[in-house]
Image (cartoon, coloured by chain):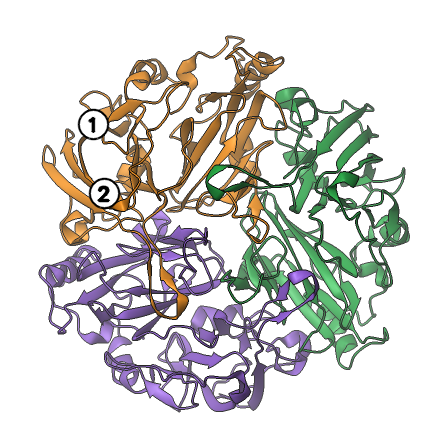
Chain colours: A purple, B orange, C green
Amino acid sequence: MDKRAPTRVSRRSLIAGSVMAGGAIAAVGPAAMLNQPAASAARARTRRLTMYAERIGDNLIGYGLAPGQATVPGPLLEIYEGDTLEIELVNTTDQRLSIHPHGVNYDTNSDGAPLNGSFNEPGETRVYTWRTQEQYRASGGFYMPGSAGYWHYHDHALGGEHGTGGILRGLYGGLIVRRQGDLLPDRQFTVVFSEMTINNKTAPNTPMFECRHGERVEFVCIGHGSQPHTFHLHAHRWADTRTGMLRGDSDYSNVVDNKNLDPGSSFGFQVLAGEAVGPGAWMYHCHYQAHTDTNGMAGIFLVRNADGSMPPGAQEAIDRFHGHTHAAATTQAPTTGHGGH
Amino acid sequence: MDKRAPTRVSRRSLIAGSVMAGGAIAAVGPAAMLNQPAASAARARTRRLTMYAERIGDNLIGYGLAPGQATVPGPLLEIYEGDTLEIELVNTTDQRLSIHPHGVNYDTNSDGAPLNGSFNEPGETRVYTWRTQEQYRASGGFYMPGSAGYWHYHDHALGGEHGTGGILRGLYGGLIVRRQGDLLPDRQFTVVFSEMTINNKTAPNTPMFECRHGERVEFVCIGHGSQPHTFHLHAHRWADTRTGMLRGDSDYSNVVDNKNLDPGSSFGFQVLAGEAVGPGAWMYHCHYQAHTDTNGMAGIFLVRNADGSMPPGAQEAIDRFHGHTHAAATTQAPTTGHGGH
Amino acid sequence: MDKRAPTRVSRRSLIAGSVMAGGAIAAVGPAAMLNQPAASAARARTRRLTMYAERIGDNLIGYGLAPGQATVPGPLLEIYEGDTLEIELVNTTDQRLSIHPHGVNYDTNSDGAPLNGSFNEPGETRVYTWRTQEQYRASGGFYMPGSAGYWHYHDHALGGEHGTGGILRGLYGGLIVRRQGDLLPDRQFTVVFSEMTINNKTAPNTPMFECRHGERVEFVCIGHGSQPHTFHLHAHRWADTRTGMLRGDSDYSNVVDNKNLDPGSSFGFQVLAGEAVGPGAWMYHCHYQAHTDTNGMAGIFLVRNADGSMPPGAQEAIDRFHGHTHAAATTQAPTTGHGGH
């Protein structure tokens, strides 16, 4: 059993949130909806928040938006193209560490890399500034890409020059930069394949991502560590584009239900949970057979009925998942504490 | 030498077929053409077929469309968006197994995963239903993707919860879901990189894919196992899109001749065989040097002259391939038995 | 210390060039600009050049455009769709070797593969011909892709059937095929992840890619060997398209700053150096933690001030890079000899 789970459960409902376009930090529960963004880039804002890097139990270190609320993965941060994010990182540990983002703009002081002396000494507080921009036209009909994307952040300083130690202990999280007009989800989940774990857990203690039938669910998938991986979700598919959706008949982009999730890469997509397949306990897993079979890189995407009740067979599936993975099976139904954010 | 080859040769000409858009099952030989699809999605149909999972020799297990005709990979299945495929799977083995598809819609009963109790016990027959749909417009100009794509199916129950044992023995195959208007090929080949094999074979016993100069040839590439791979084809290239083709001048998609084929992933493309390069014995292989060099993940794409005769140098190349890979070289020319489907 | 560096420095300024659209071979220095291509495909030309495969020191073998000027990677070759490249390869070594391109058209005589008897015996000279073409319309609104792309070339014959030995020693280089109208860069760098090295070097001896703030810099990234990799560049991003740029608002392509660079794959992109982030010493590295941490797959992308002077902190970063990677730190500032081409 996962000794960390009880502790983390009590925290999740408080902090498993997003930094909203409006600057507020909101819990993302079953009924949470994200605010509509400002209609114009002229309303780009600077958001300020404080992140705390702190120990969780004996082995983990996480980021949190308030003291005592660090999680693995850290909070899912969300902004719009044009916004700036000023992150005051408080290092409550006795290790050197930092926060390094992907996809956004930052100067060398906010690089988060020891190469540029950009990190927090033990106990130190330091501000990292991330800026974003819209795409713009270059010559020849080409556009230089803007910041919008499903990105991520992670430590780049603990235990070496590249954050290997910090990532290994859980110092990572998702970062979404939206474009004006992007569709907003009803619910969001962050899935990190790091070494041979999912969010630093292995089956049957991997997160159970719960939602209701028909909800627009957004997955943010992040790869870390030193192993290649592929992310597969049963009974749902997405376009291999910035949004996971297509533009229409003339869009020939690949559609996938399995995608490489190798170290440093990230992608995201939205599905309508259980659309055309019904509610149920759907598996998500790494498709490297040894990773899922031997190492337990598998979990459940639980699509409840629209009214929140359990669909037929789902509880049995959950019981099987908890039973068969460990030789000493437990028939105990999981609590929502197994859910991720 | 591959002891299985003689047995498989005699079967291939009978069953290396596709489930056609019209519902018929046809052998795909040099002259085979696929029927044009119905012009409208309103003509979506339900296709029914029976698949047999059965042992092939001592080590392999395959899927086949008739008793005694199992192959590795299994038959290439092909439908159109809107179609439904009802597969009655007959398990003739003494092992638990299933069939799990990628890309299409199925409810938990047809998941093929033990998690949902969806598998065939030894000797059991069970129906799996796969449905498909067209893309449709969501809000904001975004489209939710339809089912069209180069997908695949595989066991998800033999020897564990994830089909590792079944996949290892050959329980996999290709699945194409076409969109109305997609171009149809003259010939189709399924290439599965699984562990350190191609279609469970290694050089020089890997399939030799044969066609004629100028034919529109479709490759369906599938990754399996626990190793990363890249698929490379000499002298031909394709767009990294759903169809392998582009939309025109405004399509900036990547064009590749080498693509990741990691476990659970699949892609497909069409080339005009030998276009602008001529007929000949062209190599296809995994580009991980150790995989092709040490493990024999290489084979020949034989583009014959348009009249079916051998182009200059091709037989010598084939002889070299058979000679140099094994220290004890054979100068015997391969029969068509080395061809894949 | 890298004993090869002094020798290679003196060569680079002479030969680190491109085969230009006009057929000339030019040094690519800070001020070099590529010529504008001919305005029409009707001006497609045949370019002829001689390449020398030769030993560099005890362990390396490289390609060069003149005797005594071989480099690792070899010269970056650049042509336009429609052009033909005739390469007279002089093998100055005592090993069988060849040159095999990706992405372009060639007949079996120019395959570069022993399968087709296409290689240079020791001391032999042989001509390889690479042709290219524009995309063209097939039926149904689909276009067959042209040759444009960020490709590469490599040995396919040294030490076996697949060039494993030649690639290991440095017989590889970049190949760009442009489409009319593509934007041309101010500066170009070739980055090859091969086994656990970058351009056959490891930190701190990996190439330092130098440019000035605001220059349009083009990276050509190539994967080789038998390991998976991901290429990550700090503070810059690109679209995952043929050009690394987008088409405008209706282009939903992925934008990335980290991308798989597995064996046989290649991609390229252009960034405006330091745009919106400022000049500085920016890290590029493989994001597999063990590859960068343990094996030294990391280097510096040095964006100087627009006037060529060093930005604040950059020299300190370079010193750190040279100091921390080796236990016996050197405080000596790197010369331009650490720069790549």
In the rendered structure, find residue B44 and report the number of the disc placed on it: 2
Which residue corresponds to the image point at 34% horizontal and 82% vertical from the top-left? A34
Q: Quadrant of residue A84?
A: bottom right
| Residue B147 visible in image | yes
Q: Is B143 positioned to the left or the right of B123 in the image?
A: right
Side (left or right) of B97 relative to C55: left
Few, some or many residues within 10 Å of mark 2 (<14, 14–19, 20+): some
Q: Position of residue C106 (x, y in %)?
A: 67, 29
Mark 2–mark 1 distance (CA, rounded to whole Å): 31 Å
Considering depth in this image, is B341 or C38 the residue closer to the camera? C38
Q: Quadrant of the C terminus of chain B?
A: top left
Up-down relation of residue B52 to residue C245 (above or below) = above
| Disc assigned to residue B54 | 1
Tell me, for residue B322, which label it has, or none: none
Q: Amino acid at mark 2?
A: Ala
Residue C176 vs C237, above or below: the answer is above
**Circle 2 — which element?**
loop
Q: Is residue B90 above or below residue C196?
A: above
